[in-house]
Amino acid sequence: MILRLAVTGLGAIMAVAAALADPPELPRGRGDACVAPTDVMRREHMDFLLHQRDRTVHEGIRTARFSLSGCVDCHVQQNVDGSYIPVDAPEQFCDTCHRYASVKLDCFECHATTPSTGLSALAPGARDFAGILSFGGGPRPRPAGE
């Protein structure tokens, strides 16, 4: 019992210390401004992404304002050779903030961590799946001879 209270107390102290610490320095995005003010995005980006997911997956409504791919496109950094550094790599945009907040970053277990190179680079089955997503239902029409 005493050990449980001590661990709980230590956890509370660490949470307060993290809240009082300066937020991490994050690389600036590519655009002139984010889709919402920085303080709002820090607090509510997960809610925006979940709402966007629900509208896309459940209702077939695809918009760009709070899309995860839009976030990646804007916040991804490049190496000196021009290749993209995954946004969840150590010291990159998503990793830095999520590590600071001690929040598991699991978006990229399924989603791309760098901008896409277009559907033409995907395997035929992936193109069909992407077509279903981009048209909000049913497979996309296939060109003759495919």
Image (tube, grey):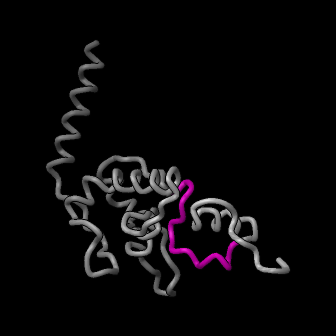
Left or right: residue 39 versus residue 131 is left
> Measuring 29% from the left and 75% from the top, which residue is drawn there?
28
Residue extending farthest right: 145
Q: Is residue 82 visible?
A: yes
User: In terms of depth relative to the viewer, which is nearer, 34 or 92?
Assistant: 34
> Measuring 64% from the left and 68% from the top, which residue is drawn there?
131
> What x and y, as percent, mark residue 97?
32, 58
Left or right: residue 58 versus residue 22 is right
**The N terminus lies in quadrant:** top left
User: In terms of depth relative to the viewer, which is nearer, 125 or 142?
Assistant: 142
Residue extending farthest top: 1
Q: Is residue 32 above or below residue 41?
A: below
Residue extending farthest bottom: 81
Q: Is residue 81 above or below residue 100?
A: below
For the magenta stretch, what is the residue range?
108-122
User: In terms of depth relative to the viewer, which is nearer, 93 or 53?
Assistant: 53
> Measuring 42% from the left and 73% from the top, which residue is drawn there?
76
Left or right: residue 30 versus residue 112 is left
Q: Is residue 112 magenta?
A: yes
> What x and y, as percent, mark residue 72?
44, 69
Q: Main secondary structure of the magenta part?
A: loop
User: In terms of depth relative to the viewer, which is nearer, 140 or 96?
Assistant: 140
Q: Quadrant of residue 64?
A: bottom left
Residue extending farthest left: 20
> What x and y, as percent, mark residue 126?
70, 66
